[in-house]
């Protein structure tokens, strides 16, 4: 190694050592440099019109549900509906064999005709007996007997006509029709089977529009709602909305129509019911399978909204925190120091929290950067939604 090369090597080693020393000793100094107060966004607590909303878990229930059964016994000859389609009241669903029942009608009609013929003869006999009564051959007993026979035939005619009516009704039962409008389910029997009153449900029809919304309300909450809305018109003062299982808000609005007169002792709740439209998702031709947004039995979230907004002190719901002691917010005082403030919430919405006590109008509430604050620290406040770089002149 030449002298020049050795000199260059020693210079590189000294330079590397100096760089390491600067980095080693400078790192703690940089770590100890103050970062400054955290920047937080705030919202001013102010009074504003707020739509009051209460949420309850409930379910959809059909207004009418009918189990279709056979009322006479016979062989099933035809099924005329499409499973899953909607039917109208009076639409033919099933046809049973008719000949046995037609024969019963004819037999009953023959009995009526027979007794009517006998009655006509009895009337003539009574007339002859009465005409002979004034002569030497007339006897009162003959007249009485003829009249009694006449009345007997009249009674037999009434019985025969009743039998005829029954036979005609049973003949009509061989055609099974829809008793209500609604969506029809699948059939439980196939053509060729013998069905009758003991065969059970042949199919089910569920009404579709409107639908009921049924949900339990805690008894104390119901009392609060009554105090709030009875002076404003009761049911007319609220609107029923629902949130579907996928989290979306159903566009149709409904109305409440029933509150159960008793409290369920096991849950301390009262059953409340509303009615809401359930229109077709798209037009359907007769016999086509239809689609509607609400289904009998599905679980939903019922929302009771006040028709008229109320003026209340409101802040974003995201500003409200909670612990074992209750709800609280972080408030920025005039010296830009954060303080923890316990609050009492009133009827709120998913987006806005209405504050009953603990907060005054005009106070600054931390809504952004909450994770960076703690009580009694100084912060750099700026209106929520503003650019933090601009506040530092960057």
Image (spheres, rainbow, N blue to C red):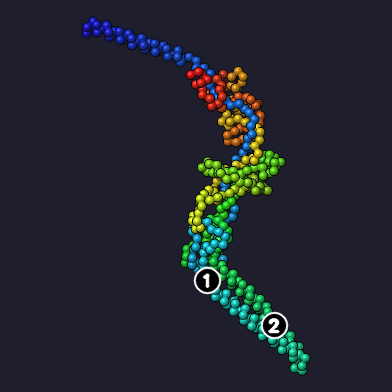
Residue at 69%, 84% in the rendered image: 123
Describe the element under mark 1 as helix, strand or loop.
loop
Which numbered circle lies on residue 150? Answer: 2
At label 2, counting other C-alpha atoms closer than 10 Å, the crowd grade (few under 14, some 14-19, many 20 or more) is many
- Vertical position of residue 16 compared to residue 356: above or below: above
The answer, for residue 215, to whether it is visible in the render is no
Residue 47 sits in quarter: top right
Q: Which residue is mark 1?
A: 98
Classify 238 as above or below 280. above
In the rendered image, residue 226, in percent from the top left (x then y), is placed at 68, 41
Q: Position of residue 142 (x, y in %)?
A: 73, 88
Q: Earlier in the sequence, mark 2 or mark 1?
A: 1
Image position, residue 256 (x, y; %): 64, 46
Q: Secondary structure at mark 2?
A: helix
Residue 231 occupies quadrant: top right
Tell me: residue 284, above or below residue 378.
below
How far apart marks 2 and 1 lie (CA) works out to: 36 Å
Say whether residue 289 is visible: yes
- Left or right of 392: which side holds 339? right
The residue at the point 53 percent across, 41 percent down is: 248
């Amino acid at each position: 190694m030449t002298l020049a090369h050795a000199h260059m090597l020693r210079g590189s080693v000294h330079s590397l050592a100096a760089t390491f020393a600067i980095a080693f000793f400078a790192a703690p100094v940089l770590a100890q440099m103050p970062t400054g107060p955290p920047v937080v966004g705030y919202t001013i607590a102010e009074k504003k019109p707020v739509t009051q909303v209460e949420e309850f878990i409930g379910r959809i229930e059909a207004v009418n549900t009918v189990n279709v059964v056979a009322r006479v016994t016979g062989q099933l000859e035809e099924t005329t509906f499409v499973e899953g389609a909607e039917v109208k009241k009076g639409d033919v669903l099933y046809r049973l064999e008719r000949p046995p029942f037609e024969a019963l009608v004819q037999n009953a009609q023959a009995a009526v005709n027979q007794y009517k013929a006998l009655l006509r003869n009895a009337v003539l006999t009574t007339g002859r007996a009465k005409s002979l009564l004034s002569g030497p051959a007339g006897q009162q007993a003959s007249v009485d007997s003829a009249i009694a026979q006449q009345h007997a035939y009249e009674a037999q005619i009434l019985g025969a006509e009743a039998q005829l009516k029954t036979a005609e009704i049973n003949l009509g039962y061989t055609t099974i029709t829809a008793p209500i409008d609604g969506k029809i389910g699948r059939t439980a029997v196939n053509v060729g089977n013998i069905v009758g009153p003991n065969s059970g449900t042949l199919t089910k029809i569920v009404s579709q529009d409107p639908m009921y919304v049924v949900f339990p309300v805690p008894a104390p909450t119901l009392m609060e709602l009554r105090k709030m809305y009875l002076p404003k018109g009761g049911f007319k003062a609220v609107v029923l909305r629902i949130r579907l299982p996928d989290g979306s808000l159903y566009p149709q609005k409904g109305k409440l129509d029933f509150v159960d007169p008793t409290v369920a002792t096991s849950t301390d709740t009262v059953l409340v019911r509303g009615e809401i439209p359930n229109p077709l998702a798209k037009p359907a031709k007769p016999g086509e399978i239809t689609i509607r947004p609400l289904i009998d039995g599905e679980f939903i979230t019922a929302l009771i909204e006040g028709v008229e907004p109320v003026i209340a002190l409101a802040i974003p719901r995201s500003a409200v925190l909670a612990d074992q002691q209750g709800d609280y917010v972080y408030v920025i005082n005039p010296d830009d120091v954060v303080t923890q403030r316990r609050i009492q919430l009133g009827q709120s919405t998913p987006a806005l929290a209405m504050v009953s006590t603990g907060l005054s109008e005009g106070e600054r509430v931390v809504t952004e950067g909450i994770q960076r604050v703690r009580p009694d620290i100084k912060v750099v406040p700026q209106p929520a939604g503003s650019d933090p770089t601009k506040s530092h002149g960057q």
